[in-house]
Image (cartoon, rainbow, N blue to C red):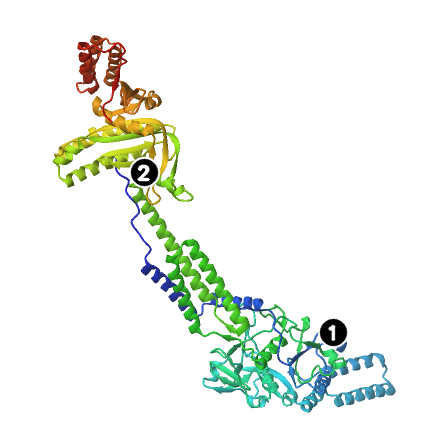
Amino acid sequence: MPEAPQAKEIKVKYRKSFSFWMASGVIVLLSFCSIFNITLFQEMESKTIDFRYAVRGTRLPEAPIRILAIDEKSLREVGQWPWPRAVHAELVRKLKAAGAKCVFYDVFFPEPERNQENMLNQLETVLNSTMRGSSKSVSSVREKVLRDVRKFQESQRGDLEFASALKEVHNVFLPIEPLVSGKEGRSPNPDSLHMTEAQLFGGFTDSFVSAPTLIISIPELQNNAQDSGHTRCFNEADGIFRYYPVAMNYQGKLIPHLSLQVARYLLDDKDPVKIYAGDHVEIAGRKFPILENGFAFINYCGPRGTFTTISASDVLKDRVKPGDLKGMAVLIGATADGLYDLKPTPFTRASPGVEINASIIENVYSKNFMALAPDSIKFLLILALSMLMWYLVPRLTPTQSSVWFVILFSGYIVICCVFFSYFNRVINLIYPSLSLLLTFLMLTTYKFRTEVRHSRYMKQMFQSMVTPKVVDEIMKLPAGIELGGEEKELTVMFSDIRGFTTYSEKHGPKDVIAILNEYLTQMTNMVFQTEGTLDKYIGDAIMAFWGAPTAQQDHAYRACSTALGMSDLLHTVLHPKWEMEGKEKLNIGIGLNSGNMVVGFVGSQSIKNYTLIGDAVNLGSRLEGTTKEYKVEIIISETTYDQVKNDMLCRELDLIQVKGKTRPIRIYELVDHRLKGAGMKEMKVKAFEEGLAHYRGQRWDEALKQFKTCLELDPWDGPAEIFTDRCKLLRQNPPAANWDGVFVMKTK
């Protein structure tokens, strides 16, 4: 017995509760990653900051800052680096005379000057090689020259000259280099640094970056500087400098960044740098935020060369226009490539360190502080964007949700860039974006998987009501189901249960439904096995066809094979089963016809049915009814017979005249497959054919003899019984002279 295909899919649907927990999982995961500062995400966020700098572009510095560059031009005109301290003394004096308010020296002077000692040694070597001889006169001249040179050296001490100039101008700030490793440097007394210590409010100095040793200028210079501070900046994992420590801890004292000291002086703030631990720094009433570890964000103005830069040699050679340096904070630093003070920034991979310090001063002076949005905003955004995706995905189509995702994702990036460029706020971009992306991907995947499984489930359910071929055809339609059809050569089958109305009257509704469902299930499976299309159930009748929606060249053969299979299934499987169960047997009649029919979707705009219409369809229905007249199970038309006569064993039954037809129809009984029907069935078919020929020739006795042979071979041969009775009747009452042997059907 053919078994119905079992549905592999169970009914599923998109569950908002499950999707909610998926979105919540994303929120929890990203929140934990944020709390534990996952390195990968930190690096990604840093890269987005560089991207935001690129989007914002260069902004013009607002602070009165000039960079005095020790560049290639200065090295050519003044001499190789390091320059004599006397040159520095001359430089600071000229800057003071030009009206510079303060001078930031981004240069260290940790050792006494040794240039004159080197010159003296070289001069002594030259004198010894040129003034040779051991005479007293030569020795006396040589010693005299050396004494004069030493006397000149003592009167031209560069360190003292530079120290005197620092004391004189009293506006020079010298750097201190804290060494975190502590392997080099010195450990001077903090009180000897000649530095205005930062004032801490709350917190502990140990929470700041500590330095066990320092690199500072020699005491002669350090003691005559206006003030001092450190110039350290720490690069991140990718090497970019984005933050700086506002102060560093040295033996319990906080050394502020020298840029902050200069900004304080530039703003005429007499108070020290005030640090409110983990919150902000205050200078001249200006407050800018800092992180818990005491680092502040550098709001760069632009790439290298953004600040007005003057060559140091131009100042020394008096080539600076009057007023160019008046009231300015002048930052002296190396910009020449060979002096090794180039650092990568978000704008460029080789920016002079002095420009980083200039950016810090500019931030304070012009109040262009870059503030990081608090973590609460980040967590709120993670929650909001994830929940927004959770709300949108189930309510929109995949295309619509994808469009909304792109809008929200790109929109959030734009908002972050706008806040960065116009409000100096760094909103975390990576974590909220990831929450949006991960939630969208997970929920879309879940929805897609759910809808695919639901579609497969619905398709299987639909296929239990409509043939799978029709379902596949519907799914291929680009614009959905539209009314209309096309003419094709097909084979249609009508199958009906004999006497089912009487059966229904004798049995209860449950029994009737049960046996009908069993019968229809098995017969429908037979249709599907030959890839037929189930059109509809008409009460206890089945209408099916072959050749559409998928073209089948052997549609007539498939239909005949199905009809024989249905008959065999009924007699060999269902009848014995029902007999064992004490149920009454059912008998069927099947009619088949092949011809041109219109197939397609017929109905209203709201309800449509994939079906057949046409005269050939009506004939198939009438052939099914004709099986009652001839007491056979399967009758096929002549057009069907012509297509299967080489494969199927058939016998011609009669020429009939059906209602609505002007020409007689030749009908055949489908007996069996030709190979399976060899033997008694074939003998019966031949005997009937001979009897039918005698019948049409009005040779009644010869015809009766052949029909009798059929009954001997098969006592239940209905057509043989019918024609036996006809022959006897016609022998007693001969037909008219124009009798053609056509039987006129009285049924519809």
Three-letter code, disc 1: Lys
Callout 1 crowding tier (Cα within 10 Å): few <14, some 14–19, many ≥20 = some
Query: Is 325 situated left or right of 285 in this image?
Result: right
State which mark lies toward you, 2 or 1. Answer: 2
Quarter of the image with the C terminus in it? top left
The foreground one among 390 and 115 is 390
Residue 668 has which mark?
none
Task: Name above or below for residue 137 compared with residue 692.
Answer: below
Query: Is 429 situated left or right of 357 in this image?
Result: left
The foreground one among 179 and 474 is 474
Query: Is 133 situated left or right of 308 in this image?
Result: right
* Secondary structure beneath label 2: loop
* Secondary structure beneath label 1: helix
Q: Position of residue 133 (x, y in %)?
A: 86, 82
Instruction: Name the quadrant containing residue 502.
Output: top left
CB atoms of marks 2 and 1 within 8 Å: no
Mark 2 — residue? 467
Q: Position of residue 15 (x, y in %)?
A: 32, 57
Callout 2 crowding tier (Cα within 10 Å): few <14, some 14–19, many ≥20 = many
Three-letter code, disc 2: Thr
Residue 73 has which mark?
1
Instruction: Name the quadrant containing residue 652.
Output: top left
Sequence-first tag of 2 and 1:
1
Query: Can the viewer see residue 26 in this picture?
Result: yes
For the residues labelled 2 and 1, the Cα–Cα distance comes to: 90 Å
Q: Residue at x 45, y 86 (%)?
A: 202
The foreground one among 550 and 198 is 550
